[in-house]
Amino acid sequence: MTEKILILDFGSQYTQLIARSVREAKVYCEIIPYNKEIIYDPSLKGIILGGSPFSVNEPNALQIDIKAINAKLPILGICYGAQLTAKTYGGKVEKSDKREYGRAIFMIKKSDDLLQNISTTSQVWMSHSDTIKELPAGFELLGTTESIPVAAFKRASNKEQPLYGLQFHPEVYHSAEGKTIIKNFLVNICKCSQNWTAAHFITDTVEALKKQIGNKKVIMGLSGGVDSTVAATLIHKAIGKNLYGIFVDNGVLRKNEFEEVLEIYSKLGLHVIGIDAKKHFYKKLADKTDPEEKRKAIGGGFIEIFDEEAKKIEGVELLGQGTIYPDVIESLSVYGPSATIKSHHNVGGLPDTMKLGLVEPLRSLFKDEVRRVGLELGIPHDMLFRHPFPGPGLGIRILGEVTEEKVRLLQNADAIYINGLKKHNLYASVWQAGTILLPVKSVGVMGDERTYEFTVVLRAVTSVDGMTADWAHLPYEFLADISNEIINNVPGINRVVYDISSKPPATIEWE
């Protein structure tokens, strides 16, 4: 039986970070909307109430029956969850004299199992406009900050299920010992055994896939990316030759990617059909310069090829996809910023005529967990830790019209850049790197001859999740070497520039 923690989502931007912290402690958890019915079973060990952009004092404040939940399970309330707990039991929650946002120093007033191995003073992260002025009767103060009287508390009684509240966000990076506090809640309070590992996940998932799929055939559109590769490998472990993969060369992949990815799939024992459709895509992209039109042409072209190939396989009933947990969370309807509704299809949305059931073995995992499962499955490290690559590929890294000649130029220049990052041990320190071909020609001199050739832009950023990014401060000597190598080895390019824009205001990709 897999032990489980439920995180009730009230719309906080940090809800996913709570889940990641729980998972890092080797405890399985799920995020559900605050108003979804809780299914109580022996695997459920505790509840975490997340934060919210709302105030508990608003007329339409998001409410739950904390007392009913706590009668059955331990609870940890974070920020809004702590304020809602205090108010529910008769405490006083009021508007802060000033909005408290950012770093603060947490000072322990009373030691407790929740605060085991935590320093007497510790940096934490605040993000709230209300504050708890008075605790309810029967509750104990555990900690304060210079600005607020109640930063951590618990119910004093030992006769009931444990009930805790934190005004700060332990899940955020800036809370120096926050993950230890969360681990203490899981282990000391909820008595979780911390046995949720990649190997454990693989064993459980393969058994579940066998039951779900049986003798049915599954088809997958593979991209060479992390998610689809790991998902396909798991499905293959469950059903073997009944999985049919389709990998399409859309003409805008990285240099030699089509052949290299097919070779890896072969070594993994996957049955994958490789389709060279470059000419089909170049025809669809002809004369298109608008980025959205190019995206639609590439996405629509994939659907056409996938549909055509799928019809050649008789008796397919199921579609495999590499959907991961952030995609699932974003499709849930909750008030607040964490609830942005997003439709997700790894293969770009399939025609309605394809009436296929879904197989999504990774829908409970975050990206870093997918990589750990991939390593456990024996998928090559280089494939699992490649930089993100846009779905439309080089099609949106070639500004203006996409042609076969421009693709060749960009593939060659990009290969030199990426291989250079790896050679100089810079690749792993960069979140994403890529080369952009500009629709601009400039004058140059090579030998005694004037040239009039294209310009490429080198882009490299550092980031945690891609939501914000800073330009990577690559060594000047490295950039000089790469510039020389591209210009000397890729006829048609005579100028190389480096993009030093951060996100925001710029984006990582140019289109």
Image (cartoon, helix red, strand yellow):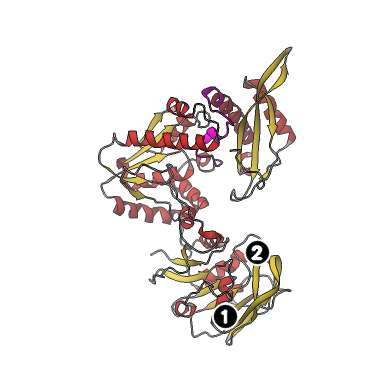
Residue 322: image x %, image y %? 43, 47
Residue 284: image x %, image y %? 45, 29
Q: Which residue is mark 2?
A: 175
Q: Residues within 10 Å of mark 1 (few under 14, many from 20)?
A: some
- 53 or 205: nearer the viewer: 53
Q: Which mark is residue 87?
A: 1
Q: Residues within 10 Å of mark 2 (few under 14, many from 20)?
A: many
Quadrant hosting residue 411? top right
Task: Please count the marks in the image.
Answer: 2
Q: Amino acid at mark 2?
A: Ser
User: Judging from the image, what secondary structure is the residue with disc 1 in?
Assistant: helix
The N terminus lies in quadrant: bottom left
Q: Which residues are magenta?
A: 387-406
User: Judging from the image, what secondary structure is the residue with disc 2 in?
Assistant: loop
Residue 4 highlighted magenta (yes or no)? no
* Side of 412 where 347 appears, left or right: left
Q: Residue furthest top?
A: 448
Quadrant hosting residue 204? bottom left
Camera-near label (2 vs 1) is 1
